[in-house]
Amino acid sequence: MIQIEAKRRKARVNASLSVLSGGCRTPLSLTMGTIIDHYKSLGKKMDLDELKTGISKQRLDTYRKMTKTTKWSDAVDVYFWHAEVCSSLLQPLGFFEVNLRNFLNLAISSRYREVRGRHMDWPEEWFFMHQNWLWLADIHMKKLSSVIYDVKNLPGQKAGFHPKEFHIVPRMKFQFWEDLLDETYVDRIWIHSYSIAFPNAELSADSAQDQELRRMFFKLKSACQLIRETRNRVAHHEPIFKFDIESVLEKIEMMLALMSKEAWSRVCVMNKIVLEKWKSPPACFKGI
């Protein structure tokens, strides 16, 4: 009986999705705005009390203050518009983070092989030798060692396993890579390897290069901090009204342009979609 009822529920859900997607056999990707429009087309009213319970009245009240009418129904419209913006924003944010960590890792690996004269991955070397060849600050050493320990002790991991770059790099948090852009690492890493992480950066070849490099990394770290803070707000489903979204997107483009022209061209398309959504709020939105 339980299995039969489960199949019936699944059939009802699929039927609803088919209706919402215009009768297509494969349901289209749906937004909450689409579902709301569907309710309206059926002459049904949304149960605002249920929505206030699920979203929470306190959270929804933030969006209600952004409406011209302060009606709860308008707050819901603003909430779902904001959710669609954030959903589109996750793509360039995620694309940026992946490129950042891989290009920085490429430069670190190159610097490691130059300093150590070895062909092992740098996390593996660190694990074997227990040497801080990167001259990382204690806090960053602890973060790195914690991830290496976790990977080495994953369930089912074979005895004697030693993690490599591709095991470690994706598991290091965004802030770890952001912190490596700090001025303290210019002399340790970037003065030797900046052209690998940021091959499109054009710096003078004279004695002014050192200060120019420091200014560049100060700018990069500041940009990266804003991008990370935006990413964190989006990932935790928090309002992003206080952020200058256009500035965030410009900084993503600026940093990716220094890393990869191809990545830059791709992210420009993503950013255009985000801006189109950001600049098309519901009529009830009063602005920031």
Image (cartoon, rainbow, N blue to C red):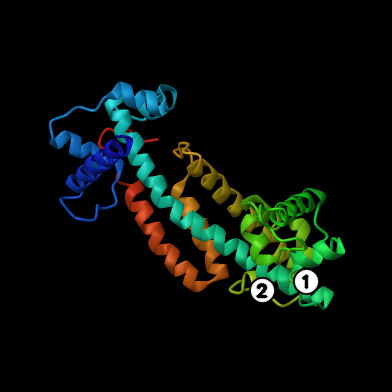
Above/below status of 132 relative to 140: below
Q: Classify 211 as above or below 43.
A: below
* Front residue (pair 226, 287): 226
Residue at x-position 81% and y-position 52%: 137
Q: Quadrant of residue 9?
A: top left
Residue matched to label 2: 195
Name the foreground residue: 166 vs 77: 166
Q: Examine the rendering and report whether any part of residue 166 can be seen.
A: yes
**185 sits to left or right of 89:** right
Residue at point 41%, 46% (across, down): 86
Is 220 situated left or right of 234 in this image? right
Write down the residue under mark 1: 112
Which dot, 1 or 2, sits closer to the camera? Answer: 1
Helix, strand or loop at label 2? It is helix
Q: Amino acid at mark 1?
A: Tyr
**Residue furthest front in the image:** 1
Residue 41, horizontal then vertical, whole percent: 13, 37
- Describe the element under mark 1 as helix, strand or loop: helix
Q: Residue 61, percent across and down?
A: 40, 24
Closer to the N terminus: mark 1 or mark 2?
Answer: 1
Q: Can see residue 70?
A: no
Alpha carbons under labels 1 and 2: distance apart:
15 Å
Q: Looking at the picture, does residue 261 appear above or below residue 138? A: below
* Mark 1 crowdedness (10 Å alpha carbons): few <14, some 14-19, many ≥20: many
Quarter of the image where one finds residue 106 = bottom right
For the residue pair 66 and 202, the one nearer the viewer reads as 66
* Residue 196 image offset from top left, x and y in percent: 66, 73
